[in-house]
Image (cartoon, rainbow, N blue to C red):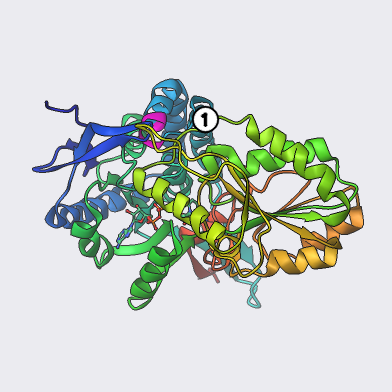
Amino acid sequence: MSLPTMQTLAGGRWIGGDDWIDVFDPADVREPYLRVPALTAERVTAIYADAEAGFAVWRATSAITRSAILAKASALLRIRNAEIADAIVRENGKSEVEARVEAEKAADFFDYYAGAGRDGYGSLIHDVRPDTRTGYQREPLGVVLAVTPWNDPLITPARKLAPALAAGNAVVLKPASETPTSALYLARALHDAGVPAGVVNVVTGRTAEISDALLDDPRIAAVSFTGGNEVGEALRVRLAARGVRFQSELGGKNASVVLAGANLPKTVTAVVAAAFGQAGQRCTATSRLLVDRAVHDEFLPLLLAEIAKLRLGPLVSRARQRDVVAHIDLAVKQGAVVALGGTEVPGPGCHVEPTVLTGVTVDMDVWREEVFGPVLAVRVVDGLDEAITAVNDTRYGLAAAVFTDSLAAAHRFLAEVDCGQIAVNTTTSGWDVHQPFGGFRHSGSPFKEQGPEAMRFYTKVKTFAIHFG
Ligand code: NAD
């Protein structure tokens, strides 16, 4: 039976492939439902030539015109929200509500950077010579490669493309092989909005076959990567050798802390959302929970009762499902206690039960390694000092939350926890498009995404002196 296909955008044209890759629905992975082109390495190299040509046109386009095109792309994403959300649900498995929010937020990114792109982000500086005007301006970098994972298949590309394009760069986007279709909907919105040929290109294909052509092209000015630590570190080393600017958003082992005095029902709601939203497949998901001994026995039953009501969507693939179950099994072998869930849900989909592990100790893998699934590891702590030390005792530094009624505790948590995102009485996830986002230490590079900070990565500073005497 021949499957429907989606073409990809390269050099302003929609193209197929000599070969195709299958896309699966995580709710039923028995058969693929769609195919996208498996581009060859030669085609990838040709795309960089297209992108270089596109950059020449785009950088010469006024920032006002570029912004108008991005605003139009945003409008198209909003008009097409339901259709795009269906595509997200189909390839990723998240809920319809989550997918609609994702599509809405992707549109927000283009609105925000349509506005921000009008700002040159430069400055005038006084000169010791009275007849000389000095200052600096920001200029685009050139061709930017964006490499994105499967867990937010539309918004992660949008988070990179909106500022990159607003700053005047051309983009080659490589979405995750599991979830290429959302990226193609994004490319369609940008193409239909009037982005010139070659400015936005999407590389679909088998990663191993195209990796060298994708990463080693001399025309790449910068790479923005979101994904796992192993791949991110390999890319960092490889690109550093050529002096290519590199941004990464990597894994997390995010903790939420519940202190005595916290509003327990509200805390339960926030922790459940942070740990089990998108079946735990968020880089900012809470996966470690530290509960003050003074409230532990009251809090835990409330939490378990709420989690027991959840009906989670599938994980993205069989491989991810097996991996998450293996994490749970290893934790149990190492002495953790399954308080809830603990295994996969049999059937054609890739579901795993919402799982809570207690009796967890700091040396267990489940306390130290990212699981990226619906698994929450719980430990008891005695007070704020112990909690802060435990939160920081990880190589990651993405997000952390504290639930408390103490202003002093909140301030200390903010000051002393070494994470890029700190939440007080709210979830570790859900940062808005205008709020700078990114992790410390092994969670990512110093370049931030989102908000005005993102423009730093996608531009370079040129300083000038104009002598008019
Ligand atoms: P991954 O690292 O396996 O893949 C990410 C992307 O890199 C995919 O597009 C993949 O095809 C590509 N890739 C892999 N090897 C490559 C190579 N050799 N050459 C070129 N491209 C290559 O990650 P994943 O499994 O897709 O995503 C899950 C990970 O992403 C988790 O670790 C999660 O924490 C992380 N993540 C981080 C953030 C954040 O903002 N910090 C957000 C979402 C996900």
Task: Determine which quarter of the picture holds residue 396.
Answer: bottom right
Q: Quadrant of ligand 1?
A: bottom left
* Residue depicted at 69% across the width and 44% down the height: 427
Residue at (34%, 51%) from the top-left corner?
A: 170
Q: Is residue 263 left or right of residue 278?
A: right
Q: Position of residue 328 (x, y in %)?
A: 52, 53
- Residue 146, image x, y percentages: 37, 54
Query: Left or right of 243: which side holds 56?
Result: left
Would you place residue 165 above or below residue 229 in this image? above
Q: Which quadrant holds residue 210?
A: bottom left
Q: How many marks?
A: 1
Q: Which residues are magenta?
A: 88-92
Residue labelled 1 has its Cβ within 8 Å of some atom of ligand 1: no
Amino acid bearing label 1? Glu
Q: Quadrant of the N terminus?
A: top left
The local secondary structure at tag 1 comes to: helix
Name above or below for residue 300 compared with residue 401: above
**98 or 116: which is nearer to us?**
98
The answer to whether residue 177 of the structure is visible from this angle is yes
Decide if residue 244 is in sight here: no
Specify the quadrant of the image occupied by residue 154: top left
- The residue to which callout 1 is attached is 104
370 falls in the magenta region: no
Magenta segment main secondary structure: helix
Mark 1, other Cα within 10 Å: few <14 / some 14–19 / many ≥20: many
Q: Is residue 91 magenta?
A: yes
Quarter placement of the C terminus: bottom right
Left/right placement of residue 462 relative to residue 171 reads: right
**Where residue 22 sits: x, y (%)?**
22, 39
Q: In x, y percent, where is residue 76? A: 42, 26
